[in-house]
Amino acid sequence: MSASDAQNNRGAGDIDAQETREWMEALAAVIEKEGPERAHFLLEQLLEEARQNSIDMPFSANTGYVNTIEPTEEARCPGNIEIEERLRAYMRWNAMAMVVKANRHNPDDGGDLGGHIGSFASLAHMFGAGFNHFWHAESENHGGDCLYIQGHVSPGVYARAYLEGRLTEEQLLHFRQEVDGKGLSSYPHPKLMPEFWQFPTVSMGLGPLMAIYQARFLKYLHARGIANTENRKVWVFCGDGEMDEVESLGAISLAARENLDNLIFVVNCNLQRLDGPVRGNGKIIQELEGEFRGSGWNVIKLLWGSNWDPLLARDKDGALRKIMMETLDGDYQAFKANDGAYVRKHFFGRDPKALELVSHMSDDDIWNLRRGGHDPQKVYAAYHQAVNHKGQPTVLLIKTVKGFGMGKAGEGKNTVHQTKKLTDEDIKYFRDRFNIPIPDSELPKIPFYKPADDTPEMQYLHERRKALGGYLPKRRTKADESFTVPSLETFKAVLEPTAEGREISTTQAYVRFLTQLLRDQALGPRVVPILVDEARTFGMEGLFRQVGIYNPAGQQYTPVDKDQVMYYKEDKAGQILQEGINEAGGMSSWIAAATSYSTSNRIMVPFYVYYSMFGFQRIGDLAWAAGDMQARGFLLGGTSGRTTLNGEGLQHEDGHSHILAGTIPNCVSYDPTFAHEVGVILHHGLKRMVEKQDNVFYYLTLLNENYAMPGLTAGTEEQIIKGMYLCKPGAEGDKRVQLLGSGTILRESIAAQALLATDWGVQADVWSCPSFNELTRDGQDCERFNLLHPTEKQRVPFVAQQLEKHAGPVVASTDYMKNYAEQIRPFIPKGREYKVLGTDGFGRSDFRSKLREHFEINRHYIVVAALRALADEGKLPLAKVAEAIKKYGIKTDKVNPLYA
């Protein structure tokens, strides 16, 4: 038959049954005599030959709805499975008791504390295998594995740590009661438990995304010779429902492309999300298998426990396998919410041959057929294969039951995720189900259970962790190494005035600072420049050749710009992380580098520069997670301000990133105007984050607008850091105003200073305010101190200190929403008028001068605001304000920019 005939007959019935049978028999013979690997190779060769002959062969990334690993291929668990089962039972009990107690405590105190029982119940076996046999702590011979623990299972992790003696009963009793310093955080939060949790994961989707870039960063550290990470693994636990978060799957192609065989995803497929089935009408495991295998991952499915193996071995005609494949997830969930008789009728009863397979089994036997995730031997075998696989990341799709062991309290039911209160009957069932040695008389107290230290269980618990280097999870709070930051004078190229006739932008100043830092022999190699495909926009293409772009495969092609000085150079030991058009990936790489002091005991200094509008607005949840993780590094919002990126329009023009930055407590943010401010701030950030190892990170907005730079005035460095310094005093005069500004709009304030003097006889002092956010925090801190210490010497906010010797009303103008500068209103000296100009409203495209007129922040509006403030203080007639409006051609009837 020709290829074309074969194509024409596609979809028709079998036209030659004997030939088909011969092919099938031949394949079966190969499998039997030479093994499945040889059969797989031959099939791949046949498929490739068919494709080469233009036979359209649709790709299927799916395998049967059975375990990937055959029983005969399973690595045997070397541990004592019976003891491990007992330990797991105690952990299940203590986790349940912790949540139930928290929700019975002080019911009149404003409601429940919440918590989750069902999630840990579903993956306790998976945690047991990992903690007992696979997960290494940091030790002399191992850098330690990274564990991204599914957020809702934190009670189970606490329960284990309690048995290990790492947490006390008092701490368990204060689950989710943290204010007094005794409690345990609801979920994994490094900020709240800095020596315990490594990574925050309960903002679902972020854990999988960050973990991929963490695994890549470990490879990066190794490739650059900074740390030996070759034996470390990144384990990522997530739920099958969590995989619907776009971030969960968003970077899986990167993991395959870069052969991240140090990365293992464990997807807890209990078929339920928070309120119902993940895929009631489908099969989430098959869907995820296709997604991951299609992206190049090694996929291991663990669906059925060991007591299914005899049934599958007797399923010669495939009736049971067919039912397994055709049964929908919604039905699988219903089976576990009922009983064995229900399963016999509605599952096995779908085919008489399958029903015959279980004819010798009681309803209880059928009910006790376990899913793979609840079989410790099967879980061990899956983990063993995953850690020994080379060249690809691995995903384990492990089928479980949500609320396993909870019985009528919610096992397999839609309500189980919210279950946090159990009746006395439920608690008794739980006690009996897991054989916890607590008498009936004690059950009302729901006591925690911990065996004596000399019992076999406790000895085994500690022995297993000793063999793996120590206890987990555990977090390092400071790196053992130290660096001395080069002196500020080292960066004089950005501190000195620009030469006459020369203009630069603050973006160029940043690049000059970074270039100089890279030359430092000690700290330079620890710098991690991170880009998202806009290097030339920010003038950073010179770094391509200087330090190279990291690529584990090197550069196997000849770059189109090879003949240019600044050609695109990729290198196995490259220093730049070039993420492509991918802000979330850039931020995840930044987080990995910014927390390397903790995860790898290596201080790294990441600089991630991006369009400012595509920063906090776009990846704000990751920025918040970075704060939780105590990240240290620099974020740089390029082409910032609502009117500075003049041609790009509404979705590019940032007028609010500093407001968003101010919501993250350990983010220190600045909007510098001049090159010397950039230098002073970056240097100060290095001193804090590298030398002092302070748990803060810095956000700077940068400009693409060129102008002359005045240079640093000695003695203003500390004021720059605090957020405000006098940059251009006015002349003597009776009528006086104070003009505050930041970023590019400070230059409009300087222009307004001249107009006020020449046109209206008003003198102005101009203040550069690199950080209204820092000024606000200082002022609020002073107010709090004064409120709580009324009899002590009252503190004066820095804003008031700066302005108290300079008379006149105050006008602030920035390229950001009015709220940004409005924050300091309470700290302006009493009796002073305070006017704020800002860029509220959507951005748009036009020339900068037109945009600043549109948003009413240019020099003319600053003059009018200053005159109005003087008039409000009775120092000028209001007619002068009207005169200025007419003089400068200001349109009084145009629509408010907020609504335009």
Image (cartoon, rainbow, N blue to C red):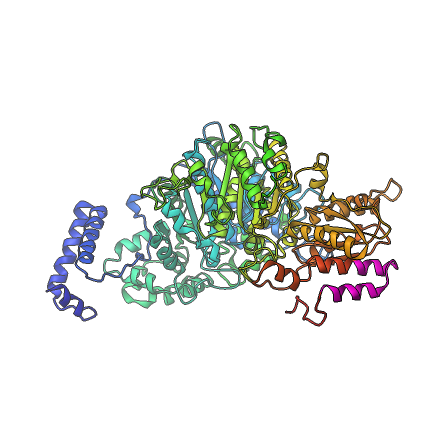
Q: Can residue 812 be seen in this view?
A: yes
Figure label count: 0
What's the magenta region? 867-888
Residue 339 occupies which quadrant of the picture? Answer: bottom left
Q: Which residue is drawn at 27% across and 64% down?
A: 353
Q: In this view, does 500 lie to the left or right of 731?
A: left
Q: Is residue 869 magenta?
A: yes
**Viewer-side residue, 851 vs 481:** 851
Image quadrant where one finds the C terminus: bottom right
Please determine whether, in this image, residue 716 is positioned above or below residue 329.
above
Q: Where is residue 616 in the image (x, y as percent from the top left)?
A: 58, 53
Q: Position of residue 67 (x, y in %)?
A: 33, 52
Q: Can residue 823 be seen in this view?
A: no
Image quadrant where one finds the N terminus: bottom left
Q: Does the magenta stretch include residue 868?
A: yes
Q: In this view, does 88 lie to the left or right of 699?
A: left
Q: Which residue is drawn at 45% across and 28% down?
A: 141
**Viewer-side residue, 784 vs 614:** 614
**Viewer-side residue, 815 vs 195:** 815
Q: Which residue is drawn at 49% across and 48% down?
A: 586
What kind of secondary structure does the magenta stretch mostly adopt? helix
Q: Where is residue 825 in the image (x, y as percent from the top left)?
A: 78, 54
Please determine whether, in this image, residue 83 is positioned above or below residue 120.
above
Q: Where is residue 446 in the image (x, y as percent from the top left)?
A: 62, 49
**Viewer-side residue, 747 vs 57:** 747
Q: Is residue 4 left or right of residue 379?
A: left
Residue 315 occupies which quadrant of the picture? Answer: bottom left
